[in-house]
Amino acid sequence: MSFFTFNDYNSSDDLIITQPIIRPSWSQEMNEFPTGSVTKIIQFSRSFSNSPIEISAVIKNTSQERLRTLYSAVRGFGKLTVSSCPDEYMNAVASVLQPVAVAMTMAELNITFTLLPFAYATNPTIADFSSDYIEIQNNGTVFSAPEIRFTPTTADNVVLDVNGSQFTVKITENLVNTEIIVDCDAEVTYYENNGEKISINNQTFGNYPLLAIGEAFVSYTGNVVNASINVRERYY
């Protein structure tokens, strides 16, 4: 039987899914420009469009208690996993639920999510690396924006090298022995202090690394311990 999970909520607790859940794909946004002839120039942007997914379901129990649980769980932003693709999750925004009564204790419900690009591996590849190049594999179907973590041991520049493309983080005294996180998807470099993320983007230089499909080579220069890279495989 089909089901979905949204954050910590499992639809099997309350819903019967009445149609198989098939996740959509994503494509780059496209613009057309006239050329003066009968054809137009097509240009793809760097951005990918969001995609909707609609899940058809029946609520098994429309008691006030179960409806409150459902309404509280399936709302806002979260991570969506569907039973047809259990090894992937998607960043999703849930639309407002509007059940339609069909019996004394049951109701039909179409649940719509807006899915941000892309589908991500639920168990991504995470590898330690050092000042010597290591080879890692991006087994997704689209380029990925990895997360890189390291702990500097001196106040000096740390240079991350991904396939020869360099990204530099200037380490000041207050950052020594503090874990630094380079989030290439959000394009932000930060550290955490009492649960708060503190950006140090003004101390970074170069383009955030991206990983093409297939093999990549990663290393660093600088005084660093505990360096790791999360490939964050993702799929169209």
Image (tube, rainbow, N blue to C red):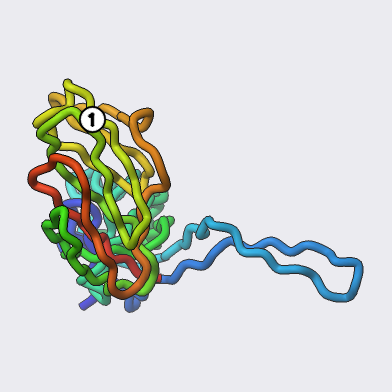
Q: Measuring from the top left, give residue 181's x and y in whole percent.
A: 22, 41
Residue 215 occupies which quadrant of the picture? bottom left
Kindly identify the residue that appears in the image at 39 percent across and 69 percent down: 142
Residue 23 occupies which quadrant of the picture? bottom left
Q: Is residue 121 above or below residue 206?
A: below
Frontmost residue, 52 versus 27: 27
Q: Measuring from the top left, give residue 139's x and y in whole percent.
A: 27, 74
Q: Secondary structure at mark 1?
A: loop
Frontmost residue, 33 versus 23: 33
Q: Measuring from the top left, give residue 19's x and y in whole percent.
A: 34, 77
Frontmost residue, 61 versus 147: 147
Residue type at mark 1: give it. Ile
Q: Is residue 141 left or right of residue 230?
A: right
Kindly identify the residue that appears in the image at 21 percent across and 47 percent down: 221
Q: Is residue 103 left or right of residue 12?
A: right
Residue 92 occupies which quadrant of the picture? bottom left
Kindly identify the residue that appears in the image at 17 percent across and 27 percent down: 175
Q: Give the tally of numbered discs.
A: 1
| Residue on which the image places disc 1 | 171
Residue most toward the right? 36
Q: Is residue 116 above or below residue 154?
A: below
Q: Measuring from the top left, give residue 29's x and y in whole percent.
A: 59, 61
Q: Residues within 10 Å of mark 1 (few under 14, many from 20)?
A: many
Q: Which of the image's four quarters has the N terminus? A: bottom left
Q: Is residue 104 above or below residue 137?
A: above
Q: Which of the image's four quarters has the C terminus? A: bottom left
Frontmost residue, 199 versus 134: 134
Kindly identify the residue that appears in the image at 52 percent across and 59 percent down: 49
Q: Is residue 50 above or below residue 22?
A: above
